[in-house]
Image (cartoon, rainbow, N blue to C red):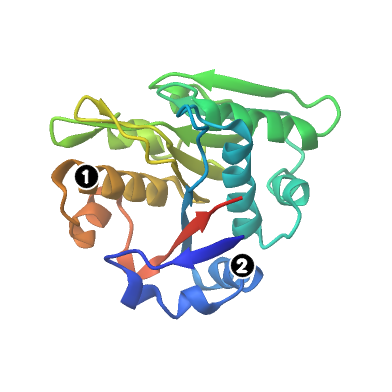
Amino acid sequence: MRRALPLLALCLALAAAGCRTPAVRAAAAATDGRIELLQLLHRAARSPEGALRVPAVERLADEAVMRLSGTELPLDAWDSFIDEPSVIQVLAVPRAGVLARVVVERLKLVAPTGVPVELVEGRDALSGASASALVVLVTQPAWHDGAIDPDLDALVGADGGPRPALAFADLLGPDVDGERWTADTAVAARDPHAVALAARYVLEARSTRKIPGLAPVAAWAGVAPARLDWERIALTD
């Protein structure tokens, strides 16, 4: 079971986009220059003891790539992002969590024969990406002292550097002001700037207990708010 929920600060502006099917939304985003941005929450992500359930994280990742690609089957969706690379690199910034490892395993299932799937961890992982690699970015940001950590350059990479085919933010259990928050959320888009925007928006809202203004967060991330097609999705299976 899945259902789309309005994002508090964006529901009116994005209501029309939310009425389209995933395949239509993906096709429209590809042709009109809009950025499809997904914020996914799994309501049954944890065991009764509070441990994160890997199948729930797999479900979040699969749902994201199916919606972004407009594809109905998970493996077909993952395969649609691969275009004969010499190597596939999953860049985990600043470290790999459960989501990054799920992404690695999914890509191994669809990688062409002889094409390795590498996991690269670190704050500067983007700067060390291979020029010939297909890059998937998985960030795991935190919020400290009124700012997202790591900073924007680490989350999106330098201009002229490798452009990820797909980007995620792991907000399953982020550190917010020194406390672990079981948000059980992931963010996904083809554009890492949009993912950084959503990650900061969510973390800042948690820290301040206020809904941030979209315009300043979008300006920080270098994204035009009018281009965003932001959908919030809740999963229960």
Q: What amino acid type should be assigned to the residue bearing mark 2?
A: Pro
Identify the residue under disc 1.
204
Residue 165 appears in which quarter of the rendering? top right
Residue 202, image x, y percentages: 30, 48
Mark 2 lies on residue: 22
Q: Secondary structure at mark 1?
A: helix
Question: Residue 207's spot in the image, x, y percent?
Answer: 18, 41
Give left or right: position of 72 versus 9.
right
Q: Residue furthest front?
A: 48
Quadrant in which residue 10 is drawn:
bottom left
Foreground residue among 129 and 22: 22
Residue drawn at point x = 64 percent, y = 36 percent? 55
- Residue, x 57% and y 70% (percent of image)? 25
Comparing 74 with 108, the one in front is 74
Of labels 2 and 1, earlier in sequence is 2
Q: Is residue 188 above or below residue 86?
A: below
User: As displayed, is residue 67 above or below residue 204?
Assistant: below
Quadrant of res 71: bottom right
Query: 10 Å neighbourhood of mark 1: few (<14), some, or many (≥20)?
Result: many
Task: From the viewer's side, name the closer residue of 42 and 118.
Answer: 42
Residue beneath the point at 33% across and 76% down: 13
Question: Which three-letter amino acid code belongs to the residue tagged 1?
Answer: Glu
Q: Position of residue 59 (x, y in %)?
A: 62, 45
Position of the N terminus by quadrant: bottom right
Is residue 111 among what the camera can see? no
